[in-house]
Amino acid sequence: MKIYLAGPEVFLSNAREVLDRKIDLTRRYGFVPVSPGDLEVPATDAKRAKGLAISSINERLMMSADMIIANLTPFRGVAADVGTAFELGFMCARGCPAYAFSNVLGDHYARVSCLHDGRIEPDAHGRPRGPDGLAVEDFDMVDNLMLDGGIEARGGMVITREVAPAELYTDHQAFEECLRQAAAKFLL
Amino acid sequence: MKIYLAGPEVFLSNAREVLDRKIDLTRRYGFVPVSPGDLEVPATDAKRAKGLAISSINERLMMSADMIIANLTPFRGVAADVGTAFELGFMCARGCPAYAFSNVLGDHYARVSCLHDGRIEPDAHGRPRGPDGLAVEDFDMVDNLMLDGGIEARGGMVITREVAPAELYTDHQAFEECLRQAAAKFLL
């Protein structure tokens, strides 16, 4: 079984090293890793053409995979990386088992509450809202309900851990727990 | 042709009014609108069960649609709403035409640069990085390359406009341009 390894690790300065470690761990649990960066990006003239080429490669890699493990650790704000969210939706639509992890324990509600210094109040219908008037999802979920819901509907789960801030994108224990759970379900 | 209307408008205090306006505009361009909130959420005991029920309904609505128009206007930070990104990926995997809009003109690179007060520097390989060491995509794209790439690969486009701050999620002109483009391509 091939697992697509989605996550913002591609943006790290030591991305190659971190991706290689995830690839190695995936093999160790009996799966075939499919990782962004597995295929070479063709030379292109314009910036945009290069971005499109990478997107096309990643889509092809996803189409070759049977499962996804998505890193939903918050990225540049309160939510997961949107590229990872796109890929999770993509694999869910293909009917693939989906697992995810986050190296932050606090759920979506806690993070948005923190963003607003705790100023979340119920509106007239009892729906929690921030000072900007936007509703705050309060569903005991790690991120937006489409992400948690898509994973659960495909028999997967989201593993969360609190790690040292410096290891936010490089601690692999929650990722490894996803591999362990997937192996127990699909390989034993 | 049925269009799924994805976006963070569901979080607005006047969500019903804004969604109804989008539904009305979609019909006016000759399409059948499919909108979050079209189906009633069954009563549930626990918070999480309710979130799962909404996710399941939205997935069903997407499965009934032939196309997506996604609102990628930045939400609680520099990037699009992750729920919308998930849905865009979902519809792209189904091979559906995808359009999107943003009511902010600045592209992904400009927004992340602004987040870091302009402190983006090329690394040894010429790749732009913020002070946090994370690479910043510089591909002349509205958001993460998977989103822009997925849309372009399915023949769609991203329309951007600058609107008054108070109209960030309620100005429908860019959305309407998506409808116009889609109608010209699929209905004429």
Image (cartoon, coloured by chain):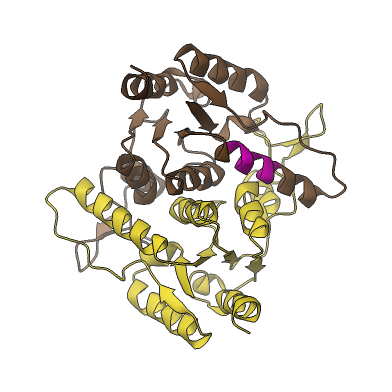
Chain colours: A brown, B yellow
User: Does residue B61 lie above or below B47 as drawn?
Assistant: below
- Considering every residue shown, the one lying at the far bottom of the view is B28
Expressed as whole percent of the image width and height from the top left, the position of residue A134 reads 37, 62
Can residue B41 be seen here?
A: yes
Q: Nearer the viewer, residue B71 or B31?
A: B31
Q: Is residue B173 left or right of residue A106?
A: right
Q: A2 or A112: which is nearer to us?
A: A2
Give the position of the C terminus of chain B as an image quadrant: bottom right
Residue B131 within the magenta-colored segment of the rendering: no
State how many labels appear.
0
Work out whether B99 lies above or below B52.
below
> How far across and how far down the image is residue A146, in percent?
37, 50
Type of secondary structure dominating the magenta stretch: helix
Q: Quadrant of residue A76?
A: top right
Looking at the picture, tell me which residue is in the foreground, A66 or B37: A66
Q: Residue at x 14, y 59 (%)?
A: B43
Residue B92, x across and y down, in percent: 54, 55
Residue placed furthest toward the right? A45
Q: Residue at x 77, y 51 (%)?
A: A48
Q: Residue furthest left?
A: B45
Residue A133 seen:
no
Relative to B141, B179 lies left or right: left
The picture places residue B111, in percent across and down from the top left corner, at: 65, 52
Residue in the image at 24% along x and 65% along y: A123
Magenta stretch, residue numbers? A54-61
